[in-house]
Amino acid sequence: MSHKGHLIDELRKTNATHALKFLPETYALWRAEDRTAFVKTVIADQTNRNMNSTHPGWVLKEPAVDGGKGVQVIEDPTTLLVQKNNNETSVLAKHHKKLIQRYVKNLLLLDGHKFDLRVYWSIAAIEPEPLILYYGGTLRVSLDAFDAKNGSRGQHLTNAAQQTGGHDRNKSSELSRQPMSVLWNLVENSPRRYTNWPNHIAQNPRAHLECQIRQAIISMWQAFAPTLLQAHSTHHADVFALLGCDIMLDHDLNLFISELQSGPGLPSNTIAVRKIIQSMLPDLARIARIMHSSQGRLHRYASPVTRNPPLGGFQVLVNGSQVAPQPWCHSSSSFSALAATARSRFLSSLSSPSWW
């Protein structure tokens, strides 16, 4: 999941349209068809481009690298192309193992700074049925002001490793990590709430975002569940994992996942993250202890205690074939459709009961 390339390939393989809609426009350059499509897109953009536009165009990524490494902001995508002797335009061979995504336009900024969300979720069990949980998270904020015309590489990256002071508590800035309450205050007081947003968003922008975040994570789980369940049926190895999900927002409160994290960093150098660690990790340990026996193996058959552990700050997203009711999504028809799709995908993955 956390390998950017595997993420794209799995979503494409399973035709996971519910999940793909949460990604920026993406081209996997190791796929010949994606390279062709990207070239066509670049040529079309060059033909129709707004000559006054200075917004960064694309982000080129090395799929297996994290921490902000291997990321390039590409203002002119034609620099990635080469024209062959037969006048055919193609992507330079050195980029064929990378992926490229269109830079999200009209990013929602925090006091002029780019930010994204790092939220945490857990695959708490696979056996006897999947149990997927959500916790919440923090805002990761770039310390450099966002300037589409100029600015530094750092303005585009929110990773702690790319900020001044890194993970050093004595050198890093508290501004680089903010609690989610900062986001809720930002959207509740946004002037766009009363001008550009549809009524269902303007009435409760926090509920809209809380629901979208949950939908995005559930969609990612849906896409990967068949693969994980099949692996379980083969190896009979259960799963217990804490994961991360990095999310960007635009002015219209559309949500874009930049990547999933199988080993999300938990640096204790800022107050916002320390508070998460101090509350989330004890809850996670408690759930793990209840879900597993003293020998560290999950109880094969669920008892009421096993299936309903005290969750603390965690919330159930998926329990077996059921998407759990989400208070933030009570009026969302798209969430009802997602729940139905989740159940259908789950049941179809059980063509063989051997994993039970």
Image (cartoon, rainbow, N blue to C red):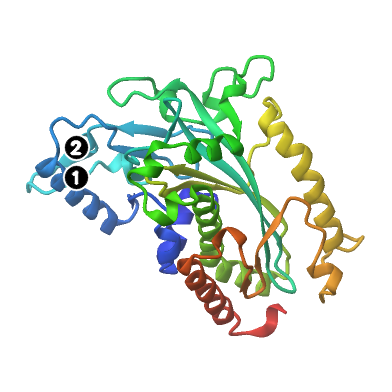
Q: Quadrant of residue 81?
A: top left
**Cα distance between the residues tagged 2 and 1:** 7 Å
| As drawn, 93 above or below 74 | below
Q: Which mark is residue 42?
A: 1
Mark 2 or mark 1: name the one nearer the start of the chain: 1
| As drawn, 166 above or below 221 | above
Question: Helix or strand or loop: what does disc 2 sit on?
Answer: helix
Quarter of the rendering occupied by the C terminus: bottom right
Residue placed most toward the observer, 276 or 264: 276
Residue 135 as seen in the image, left or right of residue 186:
right
Residue type of the residue flagged with mark 1: Val
Question: Helix or strand or loop: what does disc 1 sit on?
Answer: helix
Q: Position of residue 73 (x, y in %)?
A: 34, 32
Residue 219 as seen in the image, left or right of residue 323:
left
Tell me, yes or no, if residue 148 can be seen here. yes
Q: Which mark is residue 339?
A: none
Look at the numbered discs 2 and 1 and tell me whether their residues touch, using CB distance below 8 Å: yes
Residue type of the residue flagged with mark 2: Thr
| As drawn, 17 above or below 210 | below
Residue placed most toward the observer, 351 or 183: 183
Tell me, yes or no, if residue 251 can be seen here. no
Residue holding disc 2 = 78
Residue placed most toward the observer, 245 or 202: 202
Q: Position of residue 99 (x, y in %)?
A: 37, 46
Q: Could you classify mark 2 by the number of other residues whose Cα lies within 10 Å: few (under 14), some (14-19), or many (20 or more)?
A: some
Which residue is outermost to the top?
171
Quarter of the rendering occupied by the N terminus: bottom right
Residue 98 as seen in the image, left or right of residue 259:
left
Query: Which residue appears at 56% of the width and 62% of the height?
Result: 221
Q: Position of residue 178 (x, y in %)?
A: 60, 31
